[in-house]
Amino acid sequence: MTKTFQPGDPIWCAGCGHYGVRNALQAAFQQLDVESHQTMVLAGIGCAGTLQNNVNAYGFHAMHGRVLPAATGVKLANPSLDVIAVGGDGDGYAIGCGHLVHSFKRNTGVVYILMNNGIYGLTKGQNSPTAETAEQAFDGVQLGLSIAGSSFIARGSSAAPTQLQKLMVAAIEHSRAGRGFAFLEVLSPCVTYNDTYPKWAGRMVDVDTITGYDPYSRTGAFTTVHDLNAENRFATGLIYQQDSIGSERQWLDSGQAAVCDLDIDPALQMSDFREIMDDYGV
């Protein structure tokens, strides 16, 4: 028998941008009629790493920096699931950055929501890779655009809920259509250690307002993001997309059986186990 747990109340500080992220995700689920038993939300470490406790879906708390390989494994094991990975900028751009690079390249149909507040909130406000200090701040959108396999890159803000819900819906639809990895960075301020609501308010530029902007042009998207960064501004909206084929769809179309279809009853594998142990002289 299984036990169903009701989503708990968030532990975030009052005014935290992550509330807006959760609300937009829940609204996107409702708009798309996403069924909770067909949805898996995996989270990393930090304040953002508790979001899976606060939505009505299956949840999994991954190791520090390892949410993307865990989410990839879930998607490959059961491609029919809506798989949502969430985490913060420290989790995704520091210890987990190598996995992010290969997730862009591999293009498996996972939605990755990365909440960026420029600090490590849970451990009391140390600078994260995106902190605007003497060093150049890390830009995950530019990173994604530089990798040929990337197929969906967007940025929203918890201060712009209508746009954020629209981007959540687009990211889930991209994954559901079998087009691959959907990356959505959310500017989500930490009001306790790095209240960037007023600092970021006048710097966000929705690419939909740029005349002639083409989200299907990687070169054009990269140029726009680079030029806005040089002006100390952020590109927001659906920045880049392409009609690719997700790696899990390619894998299924190759004729190989899904992992979830395999009979993994240990009792049926005992002869193989004994053979392995014999090889070790046990």
Image: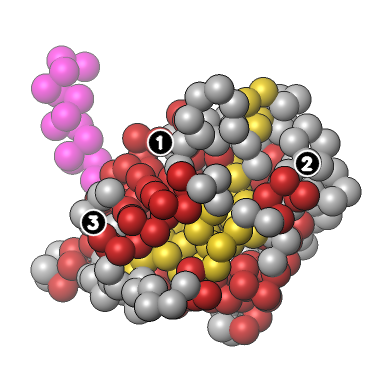
Q: Secondary structure at mark 1?
A: helix
Which amino acid, by three-letter code, is at mark 1? Cys
**Is 138 on the left or on the right of 109, as rendered?**
right
Q: Position of residue 259 (x, y in %)?
A: 28, 59
* Residue 36 visible within the image: no
Residue at 47% in and 62% down: 154
| Contact (Cβ within 8 Å) of mark 1 with mark 2 | no
Q: Which residue lies under the disc numbered 2?
A: 195
Residue at 82% in and 36% down: 192
Look at the picture and state if 33 lies above or below 239: below
Q: Secondary structure at mark 2?
A: loop
* Residue range (magenta): 261-282
> Mark 2 against mark 3, which lies toward the viewer?
2
**Is 70 on the left or on the right of 169, as rendered?**
left
The question of residue 246 being in magenta is answered with no
In the picture, the disc for residue 149 is 3
Residue at 18% in and 40% down: 271
Residue at 52% in and 75% down: 209
